[in-house]
């Protein structure tokens, strides 16, 4: 009856008990996620992004997890898809931005100065007040320079409404916030699209990177994205770098910045400082880096608080 009324009354709607159970379960799960947000059950883990050629840590990607009291630590794909089409994704997204900015400040106080990247869902990005809310969140953390924040948006989401997304990216740039097109290569970006999307960075999708050592076509895609980034003056980041060999080949192809299990898995914020302090690039990467590369001139990502500018 509710379905019939919702569709405009004066009609019938067949009751399907199985579908009804599924809809109820879905709604319950969504309600539970809202409770989790209020109860602060979400946490961010951070995965480093490094410059393999210079041997420096340049940033981290914030990745949400749910510390579920009964089910343990849940990955984002176990719960984000349930709220992707609801406004709850906006509330969760704002929590993520706020938590990442707060964490940036804590790291900064300990002498760590990195860029933090946050994933933004399509529905959140296309909210009318997205830029205004982002500006408010930045104002709430005046110690964080906006250029230390990068937003990652899926290439496929950016293509859905390219005019609007391009305008939002442009407005965010005036705030100082930069953009990366995530999972790049999985959409249908034409050259014209790339020209119209003012995102500074392309993140090569991990499926191509993972298979590039044994699949010449995936390797060609990786090479193609690196070439695109070069001609369009964009930065390029490879995700899914699982082994030293992946990194070595990427360096040979001209992609210096990488992220992946072969470098570090996402980790709790508290573990990052020690990780940054101890990380060294693999000697094979330095050997591959050519005459300009040297492991010795790595910029110091960590300074003591007193040494900071
Ligand atoms: P993503 O933004 O493409 O993030 C990379 C995902 O790949 C992360 O999974 C990361 O743990 C995983 N990964 C990194 N390196 C490797 C590797 O070498 N091998 C393999 N097999 N995997 C690797 P995670 O944390 O499960 O996140 C999955 C996706 O969920 C993310 O993909 C992103 O689209 C979404 N997501 C995560 N956090 C958030 C968030 O705070 N907000 C929104 N809207 N989406 C998020
Ligand atoms: Mg991402
Ligand atoms: Mg990705």
Image (tube, rainbow, N blue to C red):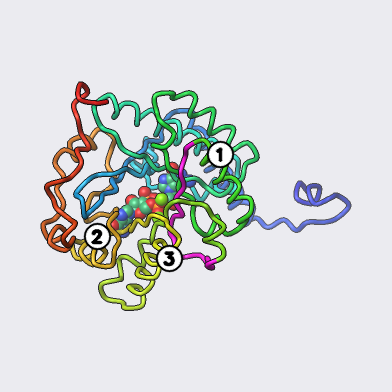
> Badge 2 is on which residue?
242
Residue at the farthest bottom position = 216
Give the label, 3 or 2, closer to the camera: 3
- Residue 99 position within the rendered picture, expressed as x and y whole percent measured from the top left: 41, 31
The quadrant holding residue 192 is bottom right
Tell me the crowding category of disc 2: few under 14, some 14 to 19, or many 20 or more residues within 10 angstroms, Cα based.
some
Is 177 magenta? The answer is yes
Residue 13 in view (yes/no): yes
The magenta-colored residue range is 176-191
Would you name the residue on which mark 1 appears? 90
Q: CB atoms at circles 1 and 2 under 8 Å apart?
A: no
Q: Closer to the camera, 146 or 63? A: 146
Q: Secondary structure at mark 3?
A: helix
Q: Is residue 3 left or right of residue 25?
A: right
Q: Is residue 284 left or right of residue 89?
A: left
Report, in whole angstroms, how far the alpha carbon at label 1 lies from the one at label 2: 32 Å
Q: Secondary structure at mark 1?
A: helix
> Hey, which residue is sitting farthest right in the picture?
10
């Amino acid at each position: 009856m509710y379905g019939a009324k919702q569709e405009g009354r004066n009609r019938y709607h067949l009751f399907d008990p199985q579908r009804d159970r599924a809809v109820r379960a879905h709604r319950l799960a969504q309600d539970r996620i809202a409770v989790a947000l209020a109860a602060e059950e979400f946490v961010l883990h951070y995965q480093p992004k490094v410059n393999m050629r210079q041997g420096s840590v340049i940033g981290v990607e914030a990745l949400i997890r749910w510390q579920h009291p009964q089910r343990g630590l849940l990955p984002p794909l176990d719960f984000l898809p349930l709220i992707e089409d609801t406004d709850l994704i906006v509330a969760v997204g704002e929590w993520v931005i706020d938590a990442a900015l707060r964490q940036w400040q804590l790291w900064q106080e300990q002498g760590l100065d990195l860029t933090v990247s946050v994933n933004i869902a399509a529905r959140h990005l296309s909210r009318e007040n997205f830029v205004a809310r982002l500006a408010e969140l930045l104002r709430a953390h005046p110690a964080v320079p906006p250029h230390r924040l990068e937003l990652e948006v899926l290439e496929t989401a950016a293509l859905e409404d390219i005019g609007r997304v391009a305008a939002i990216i442009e407005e965010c740039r005036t705030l100082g916030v930069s953009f990366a097109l995530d999972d790049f290569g999985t959409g249908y970006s034409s050259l014209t699209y790339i020209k119209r999307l003012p995102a500074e960075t392309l993140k090569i999708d991990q499926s191509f990177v993972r298979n590039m050592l044994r699949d010449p076509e995936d390797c060609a895609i990786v090479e193609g994205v690196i070439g695109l980034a070069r001609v369009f003056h964009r930065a390029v980041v490879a995700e899914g770098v699982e082994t030293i060999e992946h990194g070595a080949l990427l360096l040979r192809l001209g992609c210096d910045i990488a992220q992946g299990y072969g470098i570090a898995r996402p980790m709790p914020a508290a573990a990052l400082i020690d990780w940054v302090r101890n990380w060294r690039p693999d000697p094979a990467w330095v050997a591959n880096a050519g005459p300009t590369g040297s492991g010795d001139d790595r910029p110091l990502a960590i300074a003591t608080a007193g040494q900071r500018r």
